[in-house]
């Protein structure tokens, strides 16, 4: 699994909890476009193999490659939040940003022919609606530091639960 290359918050999916219901996609598309259309979503549900499903959204990379490669300077990154903004007056839908994104988190709107990317519902009360409405709580808004801390805690808890092998008295 690829990890974030950022210090900023991003939406992360726990593939153990994700059931692939796509509710995150429908909630996102409704929040952004007022229609239930998974093709208009800024988060994507992806089947990695037969049993592993996850959701992909912008990882707010530091020195985001999508911003760097944009030939029209249509993409900018907020230095405080890491959120990528797209200037619709500059974007021409060339898709260089899509090619540059290691996470597959950018799409082209089929109607406007402009790039679209998750903005963590920054103008919506309650934050990312996909996180809020995920029925299995598979999505969370996190940072690499919080995710690493959560992983360390899980490993410690797991190691404390493991039974120790009794030595054979010989």
Image: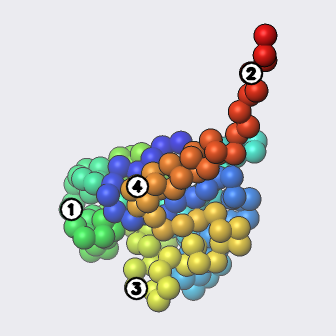
Helix, strand or loop at label 2? It is loop
Q: Which mark is residue 123?
A: 3
Toward the viewer: 96 or 152? 152
Please state the horizontal and vertical placement of residue 56, each as a whole percent of the image.
Answer: 53, 57
Figure quadrant of the C terminus? top right
Q: Residues within 10 Å of mark 4 (few under 14, many from 20)?
A: some
Which one is closest to the eye, mark 1 or mark 2?
A: 2
Which one is in front, 61 or 118?
A: 61
Residue 144 image label: 4
Residue picked out by circle 2: 167
Label 3 or label 2, whichever lies nearer to me, is 2
Mark 1: secondary structure = loop
User: In this rendering, would 150 be left or right of 39?
Assistant: left
Q: Residues within 10 Å of mark 1 (few under 14, many from 20)?
A: few
Q: Which comes before the other along the chain, label 1 or label 4?
A: 1
Q: Is residue 72 left or right of residue 151?
A: left
Question: Residue beneath label 1, please?
Answer: 73
Residue at far bottom of view: 125
Q: Residue at x 41, y 51 (%)?
A: 4
Answer whether residue 88 is visible to the viewer in this image: yes
Q: CA distance from mark 3 to mark 2?
A: 60 Å
Which is nearer the eye, 55 or 35?
Answer: 55
Helix, strand or loop status at disc 3:
loop
* Residue 164 sits in quarter: top right
**x then y, percent, for residue 9:** 39, 65
Q: Who's the residue at 45% across and 47% down the image?
A: 3
Q: Nearer the viewer, mark 2 or mark 4?
A: 2
Q: Nearer the viewer, residue 71 or 7?
A: 7
Spot occupied by residue 117 in the image (x, y as percentages of width and height): 42, 66
């Amino acid at each position: 699994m690829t990890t974030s290359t950022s210090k900023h918050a991003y939406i992360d999916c726990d593939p153990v909890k994700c059931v692939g219901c796509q509710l995150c996609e429908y909630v996102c598309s409704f929040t952004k476009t007022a229609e239930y259309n998974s093709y208009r979503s800024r988060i994507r549900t992806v089947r990695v193999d037969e049993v592993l499903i996850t959701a992909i959204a912008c990882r707010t990379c530091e020195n985001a490659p999508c911003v760097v490669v944009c030939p029209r300077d249509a993409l900018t990154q907020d230095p405080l939040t890491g959120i990528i903004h797209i200037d619709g007056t500059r974007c021409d839908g060339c898709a260089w940003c899509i090619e540059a994104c290691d996470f597959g988190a950018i799409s082209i709107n089929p109607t406007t022919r402009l790039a679209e990317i998750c903005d963590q519902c920054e103008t919506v009360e309650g934050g990312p609606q996909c996180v809020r409405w995920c029925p299995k709580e598979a999505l969370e808004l996190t940072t690499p530091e919080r995710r690493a801390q959560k992983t360390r805690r899980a490993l410690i808890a797991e190691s404390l639960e493991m039974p120790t092998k009794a030595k054979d008295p010989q």
